Image (cartoon, rainbow, N blue to C red):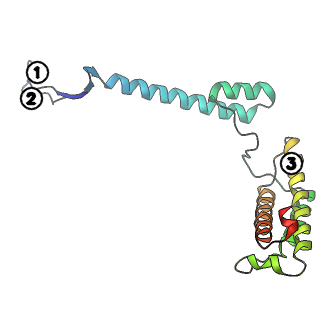
Amino acid sequence: MARVFRTTTRLRPGSSSPTPSVILLAVDGVPLGPIALARAAEAAVLLAMWIAAQVVGMVTNGRAGRLLQVALAGHEEDKYAVRADAAVTADLAESVRIVDRANAAFPRGAEFPAQVSRAGFQDDWDRLDGATRSLEDRIAVDRKRGLAVYSGATRVADDARSRLDTLRRLAGDQGQAWATA
């Protein structure tokens, strides 16, 4: 149970002005001032360790650096996180262009769902699916090599895959057998 204790105002010996009242918050008779001070000190130490882990991450590479980061921060950072956006490579840029070109066959907006019933839909879908798989494979290979990947490429791949999944579901809803296989 929390109790508030208030000290009384009294005169100091040799002084004509009273000392101000002091309000102490205590739980079951234990004052909370020292506990709050200990929590603040703990937070300061944790913040200093996190900052040290960030510095270690910037200046070291390899296993020892990662181990030191885990020891300081208490968790391992996401290996795919990119601190700064990577430059786009020529191969990746070409894959993005191919996906964009194939994705243009499916307009955005109200006409998008109607695409599943037009002539040539499955060929366009297959072309976009192949281009998207190629882009996703390039991204996976770069990540496996430990390289940072241009965020625009991952955005294009994620958007194309999402549109493909939606179109496949819509085609399946209309009874197109290839979409349910």
Out of 120 and 108, give the one closest to the viewer.
120
Q: Label 1's element?
A: loop
Q: Residue at coordinates 85% horizontally, 76% vertically from top-left?
A: 105
The residue depicted at 45 percent of the width and 25 percent of the height is: 41
Contact check, label 3 and label 2, Cβ < 8 Å: no
In which quadrant of the rendered image does the N terminus lie? top left
**Category of crowding for the residue at label 1, using alpha-carbon neighbours closer than 10 angstroms: few (below 14), some (14–19), many (at least 20):** few
Neighbor class of circle 2 (other Cα within 10 Å; few <14, some 14-19, many 20+) is few
Which badge, 2 or 1, is on the more N-terminal residue? Answer: 1
> x, y (%) of residue 138?
90, 52
Question: In terms of image quadrants, where is residue 161?
Answer: bottom right
Please say if 29 is above or below 81.
Answer: above
Instruction: Judge by depth and name the residue closer to the eye, 147 or 166.
Output: 166
Regarding residue 112, the answer to whether it shows in the image is: no
With 51 as the anchor, is 92 left or right in this view?
right
What's the amino acid at mark 1?
Arg
Query: Are the residues flagged by discs 1 and 3 in contact, CB closer than 8 Å?
Result: no
Q: Position of residue 168 (x, y in %)?
A: 80, 66
- Looking at the picture, how far across and down is residue 118, in whole percent? 84, 81
View extreme (top): residue: 13
Residue sitting at 50 percent across and 29 percent down?
44
Q: Are marks 2 and 1 in contact (CB under 8 Å)?
A: yes
Q: Is residue 14 above or below residue 88?
A: above
What's the mark number on residue 12?
Answer: 1
C-alpha distance separating marks 3 and 2: 76 Å
Disc 2 designates what residue? 17
Q: Which mark is residue 156?
A: none
Between residues 117 and 84, which one lies in front from this camera angle?
Answer: 117
